[in-house]
Amino acid sequence: MEKQKVTVVKVGGAVVENDLSLNQLISNFSRIGGRKVLVHGGGRRATSIAKQLGIESKMVNGRRITDEAMLNVVTMVYGGLVNKNIVARLQANGVDALGLTGADINVILSHKRPVKDVDYGFVGDVERTDGDKLRFFIDNGITPVMAPLTHDGKGSILNTNADTIACETAKALAKYYDVTLIFCFEKKGVLSNPDDDNSVIPIITRQDFSRLVADGTVNGGMLPKLENAFDALNAGVGKVNITLATAIDGQHGTLIVESENR
């Protein structure tokens, strides 16, 4: 029997923290047909609130150090302020939404990241995502809105990368649905020339990826994003789309597939 389609959209903090771009995103997301899930970030808002509270934000290689004080901030901001603002706006656009952290219904279990060169504090690496529990909501017409927070099963919330949440959620749902994973950000897609915003590569297969890495076209922050994309495909996700936040209709940006005939 053919699987029903589910679209998982991951949107970064730069979009959700700007009223104009957030409203546009909510409108576009609401028009996506069928069942769907929204995963959001919120790092810039967390940094702003922390500053107001006199708490210093510490970053290493673009990743947030989450000590106890910062954990309180990200829990409030991601799980409360940002998440519920998105849920309310989705309701206003006719989408029956439910905000979740990984701790809710034990949907995403993580462990605290081991200390190696850097102690990231209360940061989680995902162990398990319960696609069956998410399926209960999705099959009943409810759209999960996932905050970038998980838990360790021992009573602690853990700050967890939103791209990882989206990837792991898509992989867990692929057992039950035909899943498309969309990463939307500030560029139109994967670019062949970083100085030309219109040089979007329309399709990247696994073979293309190896070539683009070897010749240096894909590097920096795009490298782990594409590695996550192929990890998702390997776990059964049908396709991955990397696109502009205002173009999440599946017709724009870069489509990541195992091979051209997918």
Image (cartoon, helix red, strand yellow):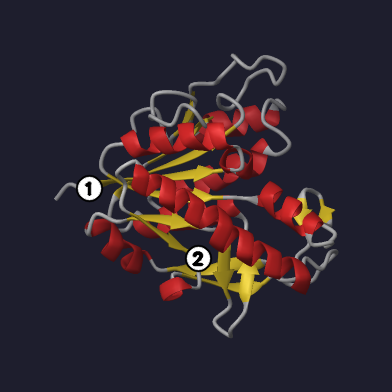
Looking at the image, residue 248 lies above or below residue 115: above
Indicate the amino acid at tag 1. Gln
Residue 194: tell me if it is visible.
yes
Classify mark 2: helix, strand or loop: loop
Label 1, residues with CA under 10 Å away: few <14, some 14-19, many ≥20: few
Q: Of callouts 1 and 2, which one flags the residue occurring earlier in the amino acid sequence?
A: 1
Residue, x 58% and y 53% (percent of image)?
162
Q: Is residue 147 left or right of residue 67?
A: left
Per the image, the residue denoted by label 2 is 101
Per the image, the residue denoted by label 1 is 4
Residue 241: tell me if it is visible.
no
Q: In this view, does 154 lie to the left or right of 101?
A: right
Q: Which of 177 and 207 is in front in this view?
A: 177
Residue, x 22% and y 59% (percent of image)?
140
Residue, x 61% and y 74% (percent of image)?
157
Looking at the image, residue 15 lies above or below residue 168: above
Label 2, residues with CA under 10 Å away: few <14, some 14-19, many ≥20: many
Image x and y of residue 211, in percent: 61, 28
Q: In this view, does 42 lie to the left or right of 68?
A: left
Q: Nearer the viewer, residue 161 or 18?
A: 18
